[in-house]
Image (tube, rainbow, N blue to C red):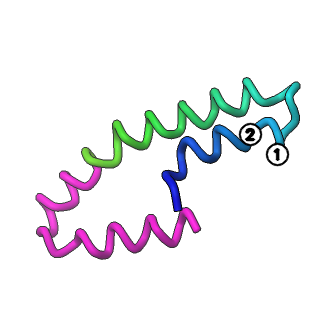
Amino acid sequence: MGPVYPAIQHMTPENFGKRYSAAVIGLQMVSAYVGSTFMPMIFGHLQQMIGIGIMPVYLIFFLGYIS
């Protein structure tokens, strides 16, 4: 069980073909950067409005959304 992000980049040429692999890797990188930029900020706003008890719900929601 290794980190997901490097594993999906490594498998991209096999999954999408060498022709499209550069574009797909670019989309993967953009998604990772956007997520790591905005998800902590969104959680911070929710936590201020609702309380720290929202953290397990927040994590389970995104775990289910990704799966």
Q: Report crowding for label 2: few under 14, some 14 to 19, many 20 or more residues within 10 A (C-alpha).
A: some
Q: Identify the residue at horizontal 60%, vertical 37% (top origin).
A: 28
Query: In the rendering, at what x and y percent does residue 51 appear?
Result: 12, 69
Query: In the rendering, at what x and y percent does residue 40 appear?
Result: 27, 47
Instruction: Please tell me in which quadrant of the rendered image residue 9 appears.
Output: top right
Which residues make up the magenta segment?
42-67
Note whether 2 is above or below 33 in the view shown: below
The quarter in which the C terminus is drawn is: bottom right
Q: Which label sits on residue 15?
A: 1
Question: Is 46 placed left or right of 67 in the picture?
Answer: left
Q: Identify the residue at horizontal 37%, vertical 41% (top origin).
A: 36
Which residue position is annotated with label 2?
Answer: 12
Note whether 35 is above or below 63 in the view shown: above
Relative to the observer, which residue lies in front, 20 or 56? 20
Q: Main secondary structure of the magenta part?
A: helix
Relative to the observer, which residue lies in front, 61 or 22? 22
Q: Tell me the kind of residue under disc 1.
A: Asn
Residue at disc 1, secondary structure: helix
Question: Is 16 placed left or right of 2 in the picture?
Answer: right
Residue at disc 2, secondary structure: helix
**Is mark 1 in CB contact (under 8 Å) with mark 2?**
yes
